[in-house]
């Protein structure tokens, strides 16, 4: 286990959502819905130590711009050093529209998200999901996940409903080779 991830979890467990980084199996399922051949801009929200970032950097074509927004300054610095191809911004996910505007990016092709939505209030969930929806071009992908055990929580059910309401359709795929097991949510704008 990466000590940075554990240290961040111990400092703020609700913000991190898990004591363990995402598994390669979960990272694969999160990145699979992205059309890497056509993507020009991909954003990652909450990269942590880079479990999804690694695959994004490997699979994106050279002309694709990769951005990551990470609230934890130590993790942001770590991901920026480990993946120099990715522009890492130490910022909250709700700032996505502002971050894109500052860089002259009108819309993005995909957003992948490692944020613990089950730990968020209704207002926090809505602010992030609305920021993502506003940033996506028509046909763009939003991929996130929730832990299986969190499905009993009203906050988790609210997140799933908000995705269905905002995007109209939600694909759900289980990933059991993760600690804890997860459900991947995939939407198209």
Image: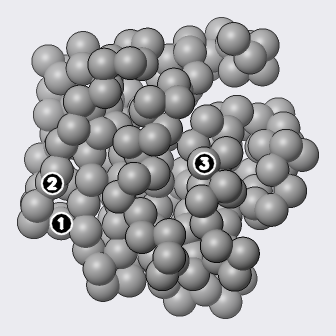
For the residues labelled 2 and 1, say whether their Cβ atoms are less than 8 Å apart. Answer: yes
Cα–Cα gap, marks 1 and 3: 25 Å
Residue at horizontal 50 percent and vertical 69 percent from the top = 36
- The answer to whether 95 appears left or right of 169 in the picture is right
- The answer to whether 96 appears left or right of 102 in the picture is left
The C terminus lies in quadrant: bottom left
Cα–Cα gap, marks 2 and 1: 7 Å
Locate residue 134: give its quadrant: bottom left
Task: Decide if residue 97 is in sight here.
Answer: no
Q: Kindly identify which numbered label has been placed on residue 55.
A: 3
Task: Name the residue beneath numbered marker 1.
Answer: 167
For the residues labelled 1 and 3, say whether their Cβ atoms are less than 8 Å apart. Answer: no
x and y percentages locating residue 140 in the rendered image:
35, 75
The N terminus lies in quadrant: top right
The secondary element bearing badge 2 is classed as loop
Other-residue count near label 1 (Cα within 10 Å), few / some / many at <14 / 14–19 / ≥20: some
Task: Name the residue beneath numbered marker 2.
Answer: 170
Sequence-first tag of 1 and 3: 3
Instruction: Check the image and tell me how it is coloured.
Output: one colour
Residue at horizontal 31 percent and vertical 27 percent from the top = 175
Cα–Cα gap, marks 2 and 3: 23 Å
In the displayed structure, 42 sits above or below 148; it is below
Locate residue 145: give its quadrant: top left
x and y percentages locating residue 9 in the rendered image:
63, 16
x and y percentages locating residue 128 in the rendered image:
41, 55
């Amino acid at each position: 286990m990466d000590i940075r991830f554990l240290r961040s979890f111990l400092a703020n467990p609700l913000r991190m959502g898990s004591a363990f980084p995402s598994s390669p199996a979960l990272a694969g399922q999160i990145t699979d819905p992205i059309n890497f051949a056509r993507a020009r801009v991909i954003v990652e929200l909450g990269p942590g130590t880079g479990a999804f970032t690694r695959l994004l950097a490997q699979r994106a074509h050279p002309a694709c711009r990769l951005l990551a927004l990470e609230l934890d300054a130590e993790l942001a610095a770590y991901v920026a050093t480990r993946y120099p191809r990715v522009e890492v911004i130490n910022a909250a996910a709700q700032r996505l529209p502002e971050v894109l505007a500052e860089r002259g990016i009108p819309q993005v092709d995909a957003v992948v998200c490692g944020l613990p939505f089950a730990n968020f209030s209704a207002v926090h969930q809505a602010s992030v999901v609305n920021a993502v929806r506003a940033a996506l071009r028509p046909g763009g992908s939003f991929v996130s996940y929730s832990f299986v055990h969190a499905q009993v929580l009203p906050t988790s059910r609210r997140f799933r409903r908000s995705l269905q309401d905002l995007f109209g359709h939600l694909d759900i795929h289980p990933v059991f080779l993760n600690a804890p097991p997860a459900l991947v949510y995939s939407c198209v704008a």
